[in-house]
Image (cartoon, rainbow, N blue to C red):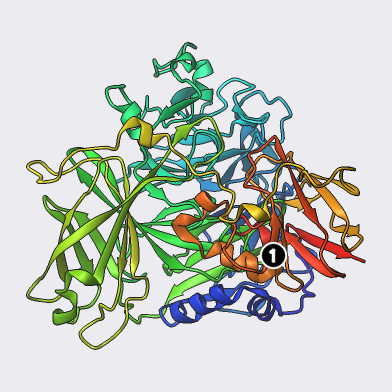
């Protein structure tokens, strides 16, 4: 079926009109180097992208969450500004990946890996073959991903954990990566995963998977995996004693709160620590899509990884290196400003990057419900930190252009902070054990492309934030993204660094996540309220990242008890702001950086009137306040990104 064209080409204009000011600024700074263009979608097609794959005709196959596979002819728009969409297959159960080999598409549905072919070559699928299937419980969180095609023809799939107030493996192999052959032979490959929405191969063919914050997962991260590895979440170990399992760890080995993942992993065979942490809300909130840059036609970053983020509608960059046989490295901002939540990426034959997006139920900073865009390098060289390598005395920074030597040689131009996350059953983690690392020396290479930093206070198992202030290229170009986050899993042999950690008592000390002004979050009924509250309000969440009530009405001066029950599977709060200030407070929460989780993403501003703490899934909190003067007072969830859709009005009469 070929769709008759009837679409108004306003997607780009709508995107720029609705995006937040901060994203607009980043977009304007990045667009001279990497250009985003929108591929028009017919009105009749709901292209909620679950997967992308090119076929041998250079047509782009797109799997959608609605169970369809569309084939797009001329997605590059070389022949026409209106690419031709053809429906290839439908009736699938939420396919969240797409691969193509030997004339057939492969995708994971909720309960199986399916091969889809067009045997009579009429442009529509007529053969659906189950390659391998697995049981499902019906739990909504049982997403399945893959297949990732390996060079030998084998395929990898991953199975999400179920959600029952915590991540659990309700059916066999949930929380695992499985290797499947074309003939349906399955081998359990690795476990320890919660929501492994993406995985990919680096330039050397090594496997890396992306994980999202949740229980046992303090922040988003990518992790190198080999067969038999365990990646941190214990629920999948329910099946470690099954025939074929390559893992010996047991679920009973994990108590509810352990300390730091890096410390606990020591001495345990095949316990893989994260290769690179992506600090939550700072670099993104939901890592998705991993793709290696295998060409120099996409700028100066060949050999590095691109990592998409669904919640922040952006792409990040990851530099990898191997130290003492262990992968580690740094992540950098790369490109913001996409129209919806990034889930999949694919290289075109011209080395442009196709980006597939969806946001229904998974809020994103890009306001569109779905989209398909294309990213191209303009050929202009950005001034960037191209690479960040660990040395025996600190780090070596490599730049894409020579630096201005006198400024780059000043140690005070570089600030570094080390921190980590708790390893526990609770959802996410605040930043813990944060400490400054002193940069004492900066040596600039003769060609000006490298700066060696001597740094004191580096720690194994910690993330190290680098911020550069004032360093420019020799021509005066500012660094486009003057920050980086390097994860240290090993020091080079002969290093001068001390392998030290803070005491266990300090490790487990966490902030309350409830702002810095207790008068705005009163959780006990005031003693002066002898007759109790005048009005009691019960709030909860509903699917689609929404409060269950979007309009509350009270009388000025009334005594209000508001109870917020977080019945969702992620962290939320409820923040009441001054009239007209909801969006502004939401943006300030996004800008809080590393201090965000410790403060519950409650910005210090008079625009915040009352709020709950940051509430764990399946938990609740009551707050007491006196209703202000008449007016409309926005309330939001200020967790970064949520305020775009999770909001309402407290109307005071």
Which residue is under mark 1?
Answer: 85
Q: Is residue 345 visible?
A: yes
Q: Position of residue 444 (x, y in %)?
A: 11, 72
In the image, residue 325 sits, relative to residue 651, either above or below, namely: above
Q: Nearer the viewer, residue 593 or 554?
A: 554
| Left or right side of 41 for 650 | right
Q: Position of residue 65 (x, y in %)?
A: 69, 49
Q: Quadrant of the N terminus?
A: bottom right
Please name the residue shown 65% across and 64% down the image. Answer: 371
Please name the residue shown 91% across and 59% down the image. Answer: 553
Callout 1 crowding tier (Cα within 10 Å): few <14, some 14–19, many ≥20:
many
In the image, residue 65 sits, relative to residue 375, either above or below, namely: above
Please name the residue shown 28% across and 68% down the image. Answer: 385
Q: Quadrant of the C terminus?
A: bottom right
Q: Nearer the viewer, residue 70 or 431?
A: 431
Total number of numbered discs in the rendering? 1
Q: Secondary structure at mark 1?
A: strand
């Amino acid at each position: 079926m070929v769709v008759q064209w009837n679409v108004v080409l306003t997607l780009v204009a709508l995107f720029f009109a609705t995006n937040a000011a901060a994203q607009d600024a980043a977009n304007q700074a990045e667009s001279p180097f990497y250009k985003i263009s929108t591929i028009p979608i017919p009105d009749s097609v709901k292209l909620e992208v679950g997967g992308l794959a090119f076929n041998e005709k250079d047509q782009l196959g797109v799997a959608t969450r609605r169970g369809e596979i569309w084939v797009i002819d001329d997605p590059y728009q070389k022949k026409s500004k209106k690419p031709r969409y053809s429906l290839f297959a439908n009736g699938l159960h939420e396919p969240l990946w797409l691969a193509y080999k030997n004339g057939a598409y492969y995708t994971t549905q909720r309960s199986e890996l399916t091969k889809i072919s067009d045997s009579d070559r009429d442009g529509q699928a007529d053969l659906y073959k189950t390659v391998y299937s697995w049981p499902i419980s019906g739990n909504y969180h049982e997403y399945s991903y893959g297949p990732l095609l390996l060079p030998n023809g084998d395929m990898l799939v991953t199975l999400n954990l179920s959600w029952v107030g915590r991540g659990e493996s309700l059916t066999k192999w949930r929380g695992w990566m499985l290797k499947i052959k074309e003939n349906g032979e399955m081998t359990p490959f690795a476990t320890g995963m919660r929501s492994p929405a993406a995985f990919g191969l680096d330039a050397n063919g090594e496997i890396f998977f992306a994980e999202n914050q949740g229980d046992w997962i303090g922040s988003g991260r990518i992790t190198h995996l080999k067969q038999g590895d365990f990646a941190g979440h214990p629920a999948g170990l329910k099946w470690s004693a099954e025939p074929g399992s390559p893992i010996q760890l047991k679920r009973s080995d994990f108590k509810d709160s352990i300390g730091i993942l890096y410390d606990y992993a020591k001495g345990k065979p095949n316990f893989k620590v994260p290769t690179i942490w992506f600090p939550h809300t700072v670099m993104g909130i939901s890592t998705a899509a991993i793709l290696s840059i295998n060409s120099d036609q996409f700028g100066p970053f060949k050999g590095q990884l691109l990592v998409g983020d669904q919640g922040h509608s952006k792409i990040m960059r990851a530099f990898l290196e191997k130290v003492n046989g262990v992968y580690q490295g740094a992540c950098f901002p790369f490109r913001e400003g996409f129209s919806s939540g990034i889930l999949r990426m694919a290289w075109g034959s011209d080395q442009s990057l196709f980006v597939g997006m969806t946001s229904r139920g998974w809020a994103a900073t890009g306001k569109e419900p779905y989209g398909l865009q294309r990213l191209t390098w303009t050929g202009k060289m950005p001034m960037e930190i191209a690479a960040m390598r660990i040395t025996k005395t600190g780090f070596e920074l490599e730049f894409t252009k020579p630096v201005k030597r006198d400024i780059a040689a000043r140690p005070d131009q570089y600030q570094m902070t080390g921190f980590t996350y708790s390893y526990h059953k609770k959802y996410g983690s605040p930043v813990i054990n944060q400490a400054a690392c002193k940069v004492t020396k900066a040596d600039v290479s003769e060609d000006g492309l490298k700066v060696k930093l001597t740094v004191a206070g580096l720690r194994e198992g910690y993330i190290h934030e680098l911020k550069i202030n004032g360093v420019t290229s020799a021509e005066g170009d500012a660094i486009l993204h003057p920050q980086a986050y390097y994860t240290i899993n090993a020091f080079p042999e002969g290093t001068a660094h001390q392998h030290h950690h803070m005491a266990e008592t300090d490790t487990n000390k966490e902030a309350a996540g409830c702002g810095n002004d207790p008068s705005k979050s009163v959780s006990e009924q005031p003693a002066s309220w002898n007759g109790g509250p005048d009005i009691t309000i019960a709030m909860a969440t509903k699917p689609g990242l929404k409060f269950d009530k979007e309009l509350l009405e009270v009388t000025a001066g009334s005594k209000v008890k508001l109870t917020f029950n977080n019945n969702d599977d992620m962290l939320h709060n409820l923040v009441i702001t001054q009239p007209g200030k909801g969006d502004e407070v939401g943006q300030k929460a996004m800008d809080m950086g590393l201090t965000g989780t410790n403060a519950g993403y409650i910005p210090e501003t008079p625009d915040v009137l009352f709020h709950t703490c940051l509430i764990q899934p399946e938990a609740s909190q009551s707050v007491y306040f006196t209703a202000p003067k008449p007016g409309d007072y926005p309330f939001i969830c200020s967790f970064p990104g949520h305020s775009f859709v999770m909001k309402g009005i407290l109307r005071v009469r």
